[in-house]
Amino acid sequence: MSKPVFKHRKLSEGQKKSLKETGVWRGEKNSIPLDRLRHVTVSYHTFDGQSKTDGALIVLDKLAKNVCQIFEGLYELKFPFQSIKLLDEFGGEDYTSMLRNNSSCYNDRVIAEGARKGMVSLHAYGAAIDINPFQNPVIYRLDDREVVEPMAGENYLQRPLATDKDAIKKGYAEAIVGLMANHGFTEWGGNFTDKKDYHHFQVPRDKVMEWVS
């Protein structure tokens, strides 16, 4: 078994080019400078019990150490993931990433649904992490119907208690709310009132704005 890896570094010129070409970084007025982002490499356990060292996220420089500590803690818990890849591998398409049950962080985009639709997402600052979208879907109202995204999330609408021993090995977000909060990601989408965004964890917006302004 390979030794677990949890490290961060500045973006390479090749990575910057890829982010631009795929639109993960849009280069608009509110886009964070690429030099403020960090590439984080992490190890993780899979749902079938493998240990991998190819996990990759892009995060805000202020949070790089925190994110390494988060994933080190998740690794120790044997919390499982299907995929942890950068959004440029999915052409910058958040929904395509979700359809692969991919866990991710940075994407220069706006909020897609709910009361804050159209507001710049904290993903656009590398200050929000999505964990296992299948096991932790988004649920919101559209007109008179309930929408679950991705559709595979319909198999996981029965949410566990945080103390449920199976919650960790099945990849449910409820099991890691405390760990995420201990490293700055204190806001969990499972507590949102306008929708349920179970896979989403973020740093408070006012703190992020202090860092990037």
Image (tube, rainbow, N blue to C red):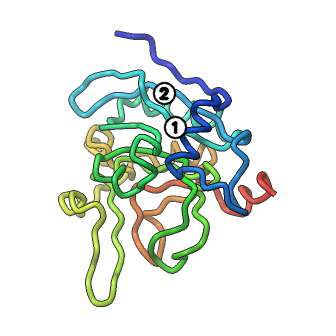
Label located before the other in sequence (1 or 2): 2
Residue type highlighted by circle 1: Leu
Quadrant showing the C terminus: bottom right
Residue drawn at (34%, 81%) of the image: 141
Which residue is the site of mark 2?
A: 42
- Residue 152 sits in which quadrant? bottom left
Residue type highlighted by circle 2: Val
| Residue 184: percent from left, percent from top | 63, 47
| Residue 72: percent from left, percent from top | 50, 28
Residue 145 in the figure: left or right of residue 183: left
Residue drawn at (69%, 43%) of the image: 34
Q: Secondary structure at mark 1?
A: strand
Residue drawn at (64%, 35%) of the image: 38
In the image, residue 202 above or below residue 141: above
Residue 84 in the figure: left or right of residue 129: left
| Residue 37: percent from left, percent from top | 67, 40
Cβ–Cβ under 8 Å for marks 1 and 2: yes
Which residue is the site of mark 1?
A: 57
* Disc 1 from disc 2: Cα separation: 8 Å
